[in-house]
Amino acid sequence: SLIGYISATCTAGLCGTVPGAAHQVAISVFWVASFLPEPMSTAAQALVARDLGGPLPSEKEVDSRNGHRFSPRRIRMLTRALYSISFSMSLSMALVTGLALTNSASLRALSSDPLVRSTIKTIAPYAMISQVFCAMSSLSEGICVGAGRVRHLPTLMVASTLLIRLTLKVVLKQELGLIGVWQSLTLFFASRVLGH
């Protein structure tokens, strides 16, 4: 996903000084908030792997490491709980992102330039939506890693990276500006969620 961020930042810079500066502020706020739901992905890796007990045992086998029976129902309940918690956290971080990028006091702290501040406000909704998709894609990848289902991950990452590169070329060609850059980022994260 780093290539996606770098591509978006380069494209924002090509849109001009003000859009480039507004993007730098928005992406910094986005990154800080996006790391807060990240532990859910790590937890998913450990908990799903624990509940699977390595290679799938039969329904009646007891996993000696954690003393419970393997249960597909238990894993479904766990993944639902993880998605529910992660979704709630991502909504909270989307609100934090939105407030930071639209509140007058926080905007003055982030930039002294009124043009940069007004430009930041125009992309806040996309940064908020991207926050939700980013957290959901991270959790989905954590669940896949925990379940040992990783064969599709390289293809998914290459496809989503190609998608953002393609959409950013359209943004430049059609002169869609910074809003187009953030729409591309939103699509990038959404494609990673849908790819699971």
Image (cartoon, rainbow, N blue to C red):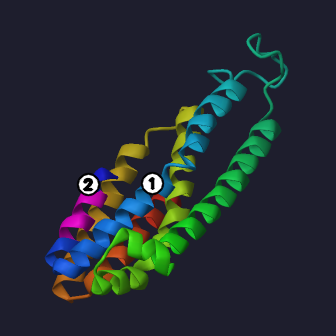
For badge 1, the amino acid type reads Val
Q: Is mark 1 on a helix, strand or loop?
A: helix
State the residue at coordinates (77%, 16%).
Answer: 66
**Along the horizontal axis of the image, is 180 left or right of 133?**
left
Total labels: the figure holds: 2
Confirm whether residue 196 shows in the render: no
What separation in Å lies between label 1 and label 2 (alpha carbons)?
Answer: 18 Å
Q: Can residue 38 be seen in this view?
A: yes
Residue located 17% across and 72% down the image: 13
Residue under the image location 78 percent in, 26 percent down? 70
Decide whether residue 137 is among the magenta residues.
no
| Residue matched to label 1 | 32
Q: Nearer the viewer, residue 98 or 129?
A: 98
Callout 2: SS: helix
Q: Quadrant of residue 112?
A: bottom left
Residue 10 belongs to the span the image colors magenta: yes
Tell me the mark number nearer the camera, choosing from 1 and 2: 1
x, y percentage for residue 67? 82, 15
Position of 107 with respect to 75 (left or right) is left
Return the mark for residue 101.
none
Q: Which of 81 and 75 is in front in this view?
A: 81
Q: Counting residues from the N terminus, which is met first, the one under dot 1 or under dot 2? A: 2
Secondary structure character of the magenta stretch overall = helix
Vertical order, 30 against 17 (above or below): above
Q: Residue at image x 30%, y 75%?
A: 22
Left or right of 62 in this view: 138: left
Determine the image quadrant of residue 56: top right
| Range covered by the magenta-colored residues | 4-11
